[in-house]
Image (tube, rainbow, N blue to C red):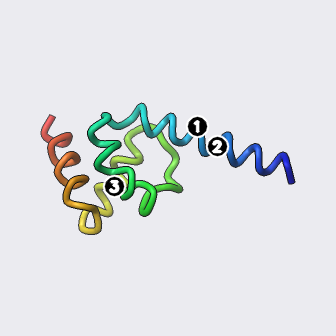
């Protein structure tokens, strides 16, 4: 049981670190709630989180939509 808990904690920390590396600070701030709600189970890396957020675009907060749209233009 302890091993399972430790593994879960380690995976959550790695997931947050990978998420942090994939998105800019502005995107993280604007989209963290949407990420937690719609894409938490997505394996970070390779643009998968951004792709997940884009897939859920109609459900995202206006702030998250704005920074993702700006990122797509770059």
Q: Measure the C-alpha gap from mark 3 to mark 1.
A: 19 Å
Judge whether 15 appears above or below 61 on screen: above
Q: x%, y% of residue 6?
A: 76, 44
Q: Residue at x 49, y 55 (%)?
A: 40
First along the sequence among labels 2 and 3:
2
| Residue under numbered circle 1 | 14
Say if mark 3 contacts mark 1, CB within 8 Å: no
Say if mark 2 contacts mark 3, CB within 8 Å: no
Q: Residue at x 32, y 44 (%)?
A: 29
Say left or right for 50 vs 45: left
Say if mark 1 contacts mark 2, CB within 8 Å: yes
Q: Measure the C-alpha gap from mark 2 to mark 3.
A: 20 Å
Residue at the top extreme of this rendering: 21
Marking on residue 11: 2
Say left or right for 58 vs 2: left
| Residue under numbered circle 3 | 53
């Amino acid at each position: 049981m302890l091993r399972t808990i430790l593994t879960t904690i380690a995976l959550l920390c790695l997931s947050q670190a990978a998420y942090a590396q994939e998105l800019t600070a502005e995107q993280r701030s604007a989209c963290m709630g949407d990420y937690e709600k719609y894409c938490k189970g997505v394996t970070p890396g390779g643009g998968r989180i951004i792709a997940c957020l884009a897939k859920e675009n109609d459900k995202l907060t206006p702030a998250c939509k704005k920074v993702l749209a700006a990122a797509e233009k770059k």
